[in-house]
Amino acid sequence: MSFIDTDETMCDDPAFALVTRSPRWQRIKNTSHSWRCCVFGDDDKLRQQASVYLTKDVHEVKTSAFKNSRRLKRVDFERTSELRRIDEFAFAFSTLTDLATDSDLQFVGKGAFLGCRLLRCVKLQRAHEMSDSVFKASSISHFVWPMNAIQVPRQCFLECRGLKSIGFLDPGSVVELGQDAFSGTALTNIDWIKETSVAKIPVRCFAECSFLSSVSFKKEIEDGAFRECGIRRIIWPGSITSVPSACFTKCMNLESFVFQDETTVTEIGAGAFTGLRIKYFSWPKGATKVPNRCFLQCAFLEGITFGVNSQVTEIGRFAFHWTALKSFTWSRSVKKIPEECFSHSCFLEFIDFGEDCEITEIGEKAFMATGLTHITWPILVKKVPRKCFSECHELIAIDFGEEPAVTEIGDEAFKETSLSEFYWPASLTKIGKCCFTSCILLEAVYFDENAIIEEIGDRSFSWTGLTKFSWPSTVTRVPDECFSRCRKLISVDFGTKSEVKEIGESAFNVTGLIQLVWPENVTKIPNKCFAECKDLVSVDFGKHPAVTEIGGGAFMKTGLQSFMWPPMVSSVPQYCFSGCSHLCHLDFDGQIKINKIGSHAFDGTGLQNIPDPTECEVT
């Protein structure tokens, strides 16, 4: 192939195609009767043309022929009656603005006009077969579907944001729509679908069609078919027995959903109604499962009716997450409340489990951040799961019943609630980390006299309003930060039968403790154990102290005025009494040999009898 300079006249030689480039014509010899841009190599001049005219004998525009042509505006097929193929990506990402041909096109390849952002007018009325993504991300505003093409292929008009309408010369000849075929378009009406011969509306076929405000259909529908559309109202036909997954997800304008026949619908897919604006919903009698994410983020949903003869036996995860439900009557036939079932439904004030409740399991975060004020715990559920009522700021009471079965409370189960008191049932043996953390109104915990408690988790009562606490005799460890920042806590009683052998770091820091009797079996005072207890004036280690070690900052910034140093402790840790401005006397037994003093151990104190640094190691 070679370029030949010519006069500005058209040539009908069948072995030539004509290219125009201002200010003069050029003629290109093409012996194969097809257009191949790639043969021109890196110095290709064809991509620089503004308009291209093809002669009548050109049969094919080959793969990527005009791909990425940044100056191309128009291709004239008027003289090309023999054109049969436009191959893959032939005009992809070019600046083509319009294209029309009456040729009997047999094939238009994948992505032939992909990404043609300036392409607004295309006429291919005699095309027989279209491939995937043929007009994807182009700027077509209207398209007349060829009468010979029986299939709208996958992603055919995907992300054609300007496509407002589509016409069919023979709608009855169309037998199939591909996935994502019209997803992301500006279609306002799809009534034409009733006239076609398609058996189903495929996956995401009309997803993100935000201008599509109404639909009427009697075809089978697949997952996500109308996801994120502008639909306002749906009347579900009785002939369709299942609502597919994510079918209407995030249809933000959808305010009404009605079933023509509630008895015929037997299945609703996961996330089918996620993010809708509906206020009330009547559950179809034939559907036995409320699926995962079914009404997720339906922020306007105030009520759902299951009916007297409801057949629901299962409710999925996140089913009513972030709704406006105010109350809910739990179905007796549903045995499990799943994970985050009602979480963040901040208007939910009441859950009715019924007198003969048969719930045996409740999932994590099931009622997190709801508006519940009172809850009667199901008698067959043995564990309050992790974050079950966390951030329920209105929750003031929980009733475990006369014969409770609960044996464990999970991490953060009642974190940031408004409980003022808690009655520890006899069956409860363990509570997890941060169980009551930030319950600032919690003033008292009452233990059943028959309770045999095995474990209390770290930070269980931190940031609470406790004023006093009787430590259970069967619990051998006071966990890290157990009462940290309980500013109203003035007393912790370990009792005479205490089995405590260990106290965790910062267990009592920033509390209102005035004095404490140290458990006789605990040998170590941990780091920051009493740090910033400004009212602490006394710690009693008993007549025969077992303490052998004191951790860093253990008494820093306390209100101690004097301190009896444990005789078996030979080193003063760093920051031990730092900031104890009232500390004037430190009583060392005459036989105590202090061999190490940590940095800043006595900063800011009024001590006069500090051990001689020259006689011990200073670190």
Image: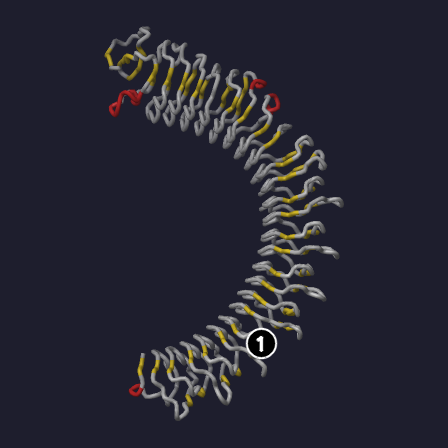
Q: Quadrant of the C terminus?
A: bottom left
Residue placed farthest to the top in the image? 12
Q: Position of residue 283 (x, y in %)?
A: 69, 42
Q: Position of residue 81 (x, y in %)?
A: 41, 10
Query: Nearest the camera: 440 or 149?
Result: 149
Badge 1 density bin: few <14, some 14–19, many ≥20, Cα 10 Å: some
- Give the SS element for disc 1: loop
Query: Nearest the camera: 232 or 314?
Result: 314
Say how the picture is coloured.
Answer: secondary structure
Query: Nearest the camera: 80 or 312?
Result: 312
Q: Position of residue 574 (x, y in %)?
A: 37, 78
Q: Which residue is mark 1?
A: 471
Q: Quadrant of the N terminus?
A: top left
What amino acid does circle 1 point to? Trp
Total labels: the figure holds 1
| Res. 344 in view | no
Q: Is residue 21 left or right of residue 142?
A: left
Placement of 577 over or under 288, stated as above or below: below
Q: Residue at x 60, y 32 (%)?
A: 221
Residue placed farthest to the bottom in the image? 590
Q: Is residue 255 left or right of residue 509?
A: right
Placement of 328 over or under 472, stated as above or below: above
Q: Residue at x 54, y 16 (%)?
A: 169
| Res. 289 in view | yes
For residue 66, which quarter of the picture?
top left
Q: Position of residue 205 (x, y in %)?
A: 54, 31
